[in-house]
Image (cartoon, coloured by chain):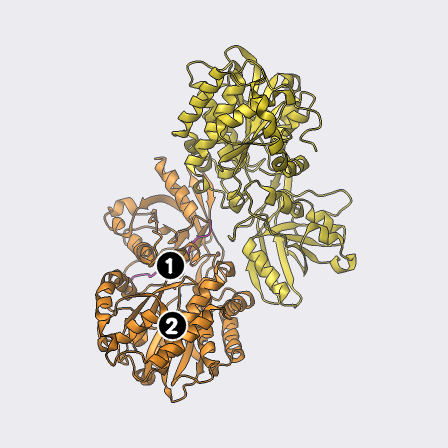
Chain colours: A yellow, B orange
Amino acid sequence: MSLLSPAFRRSLGTAVFVSALIGAGSACAQTPAALPEDVKAAAASLQKQALAGTRAYEIVRSLTVEVGPRLAGSKGYAAAVDWGLRTMKALGFQNVHAEKVTVPHWVRGEESGEIVAPYPQPVHLAALGGSVGTPAPGIEAQVIRVPSLEAVAQLDPAQVKGKIVFYDVPMKRTKDATGYRDAVPARTEGASAAAKLGAVAVVIRSVGTDNNRTPHTGGLRYREGAEKIPAAALSNPDADLLAAEIASGKPVTFRLKLGARVEPDVETASVVGEIPGREKPEEIVLLGAHLDSWDLGTGAIDDGAGCAIMMEAARRIAELPRKPRRTIRVVLYANEEFGTSGARAYAAAHQDELARHIMAGESDLGSGRVWRISSRVDPAKLGIVSDLARLLGVELGDNGTHGGSDVEPIAQAPGRVPLIALAQDATAYFDDHHTANDTLDKIDPKDLDQNVAAWAAVAYAVADMPGDLGRAPEGAGRE
Amino acid sequence: MSLLSPAFRRSLGTAVFVSALIGAGSACAQTPAALPEDVKAAAASLQKQALAGTRAYEIVRSLTVEVGPRLAGSKGYAAAVDWGLRTMKALGFQNVHAEKVTVPHWVRGEESGEIVAPYPQPVHLAALGGSVGTPAPGIEAQVIRVPSLEAVAQLDPAQVKGKIVFYDVPMKRTKDATGYRDAVPARTEGASAAAKLGAVAVVIRSVGTDNNRTPHTGGLRYREGAEKIPAAALSNPDADLLAAEIASGKPVTFRLKLGARVEPDVETASVVGEIPGREKPEEIVLLGAHLDSWDLGTGAIDDGAGCAIMMEAARRIAELPRKPRRTIRVVLYANEEFGTSGARAYAAAHQDELARHIMAGESDLGSGRVWRISSRVDPAKLGIVSDLARLLGVELGDNGTHGGSDVEPIAQAPGRVPLIALAQDATAYFDDHHTANDTLDKIDPKDLDQNVAAWAAVAYAVADMPGDLGRAPEGAGRE
């Protein structure tokens, strides 16, 4: 996931506090807005069987080994589209097709960095996604350290002019990803904030919870009115080193060389496949994940896992002797990481159909276990969400989820597609997120199966139940 | 540590089994070969005070931040010699001086690798120390996988000729470092074994217990009669990837570019400092560690920790109101990793003095806690070792230790210097050993203090006791 979305930041902040309230409201589960017993029983059976073992690990193994890195616009992403079409067909999906998406094409190039003085040391760094490059000889300048994004704005421009700003913002390890929310603004906004004060480049402490020499990339946003200056993430041990040299009290000089550049936009595609419904095939339960990855790893946890979870959840439903009433549509989105191009293209291309999307959900947090269900549905339908929480055996969250960056646009569009979000345990996820360490070995097959089981149960129940979830309320998920 | 020593391999194999037997023999602890009560009390007091907190972490912090990587022959190593002299003087050592050592100078250069077919993917690799380079365009060849060093010898040369041999030997995580002993021969001997069958290059699965994208370097040995072919270690996730592509059944092609080269030998130095004894200053208790490191990390666990442990153990003894009878000599050896140049130079330069070395010990396994004491002393003196085990509260090992690669030469020389070895917990050590991840954050200050406490107690007791440890028996440690 990239989580550039401001809605994500806001919704995270309220989820925990509101959950108790909503839980109390579930006393109305016996109203008509509840899952029928036969649907619950079929969903529970799907869940139980998936917990005994699925093909999801084999799907993510195939994607990471046979495709690997697949940044938007790259050859790897083109191979991923072929893989998606081929694999969906092989798994028995119907209506398998590519849907056109135009994506930006940012290329990392060669990159390196070093502390020049007082104690020369090479460092491990990675350009932030979208960063401009440096001139070929690099940029060498004195470093000024700031402990937060807010702190830089307090500085006198005379202190910053001509310097490299070092955002030294450590990330906290949390189950609910709030540590990421708190640390990531320095990555997304730090370059422009520093450029406005005359900085020549930015380095940040990696937004990650590990202590490996594997820097965490991720997108930045250049703001209008600020010069575009190069920006890179140092691995956490290298950020420690730079901080320690600064703590010596001597002036610290750093050299940064980034070969990053932007190439012309590329026309590529999201990949879509369906399990047609038996009664109302025109009504759609959308299961999403993103097919692109950052360039440094093989994209196992971000988001090979999500692709595998959603494809396998749908495939298991397809194998049932009796299909659910409605269609399950799996969408493997193009370019989530570098601007959510696929999500926006889907919302535009399917706008006339959104009123017939009765639910959307996405998986984009590796193989961490599902521990909470949140929603953004008609409040009168919350009994169904309560029933799903009991069925899955997970906590009940609030009704203000943004759903994830790939489904958020269709919930906010006039169609107001209702959302179900299954929160995954994020405790370990940010050790490897957006790094070269995002590889297959970081996936726990049993945890992956638990996700498949949860999504298969939810998708089946919503696709087969007689009623629906209404429409997503206005405003919710935006606040 | 590099552990190229065959004696290390042999001694590890017997240590555990013999310890029970020796333990039984400790009933003779009340013979004259025992520590006097006053010496024990003083050593216990030193130990207790060190457990409450030492300066060791600050020493290794200083070395890793102010010097960093310090491969034999490099500028970094020259800076480390300056650091050693400066730091020993600042800590109050006497007779601080450099002792000349000539070292080889191997340079890594630029390096890269990729799987070319069937599924193109870049990989993370590191040349093994001492490897020759490839021609500038690299070497591209089909890969043949073997599960062990022994397995390659079983192959028909026709299968190997013109290929890249991939040694896919996983390492087991163990407390006593036996996992390293079992996995490392493919690294040290694999290139020549493959070259004899006509291979053009070698890649190995990293000898390490982690799943990070940080390959483990380490020395190799080219054997006479075999062509010198390039050899590199793949990180464990990359070894998984290569194995997975091979498992597809399709021919796998790999490209390897190594810029490694050998430059002329460099005259440099080990660093020595002393805490002179109060009664017999000519008698020496030697505490060793190695000052060099591999080039990829900042050498925190290998062996900044050992330098800090031994310097701080001696410094604490120096601060006592009454110094021990004999001299404590700390030796920070040059070039352990790439041929134990410093250890051999020391044995040659001090041969006339070895009979007056009454003990030697070294620390070279990061900050893992001390859990066993082993020895190589006159068997009549084993009561003292038993007393030390009880004093430290650790297991009692055998009397066949090799002591470590830097003290082994003086135990095998005619002077037959007695050895004490404190085994450290190796469980986590090989996650980061010889990788870019060998950085300060891998050191636990409390664990480091436990090592200081143990070595301070041992060094004090042996330096102050009325008797000695005799001489190391012939043969022991060689078998």
Q: Name the amino acid type tagged 2.
A: Ser
Chain label for disc 1: B
N-term-proximal mark, 2 vs 1: 2
Q: Which residue is mark 1?
A: B426
Question: Where in the figure is residue A376, as x and y percent of width and height?
Answer: 63, 26
Mark 2, secondary structure of its residue: helix
Q: What's the distance in space between the residues labelled 2 and 1, CA to CA?
A: 25 Å
Q: Does any portion of residue B304 appear in the rendered image?
A: yes
Residue span colored magenta? B213-223
At x 37%, y 42%, the residue is B243
Q: Name the amino acid type tagged 1.
A: Ala
Q: Is residue B342 left or right of residue A232?
A: left
Mark 1, secondary structure of its residue: loop
Query: Where's the N terminus of chain B, which quadrant?
Result: bottom left
Q: Nearer the viewer, residue A301 or A229?
A: A301
Pick out the residue farthest to the bottom.
B279
Secondary structure that dominates the magenta span: loop
At x 54%, y 37%, the residue is A293
Q: Is residue A352 above or below residue A438?
A: above
Q: Is residue B461 left or right of residue B121?
A: left
Q: Which residue is mark 2?
A: B341
Q: Residues within 10 Å of mark 2 (few under 14, many from 20)?
A: many
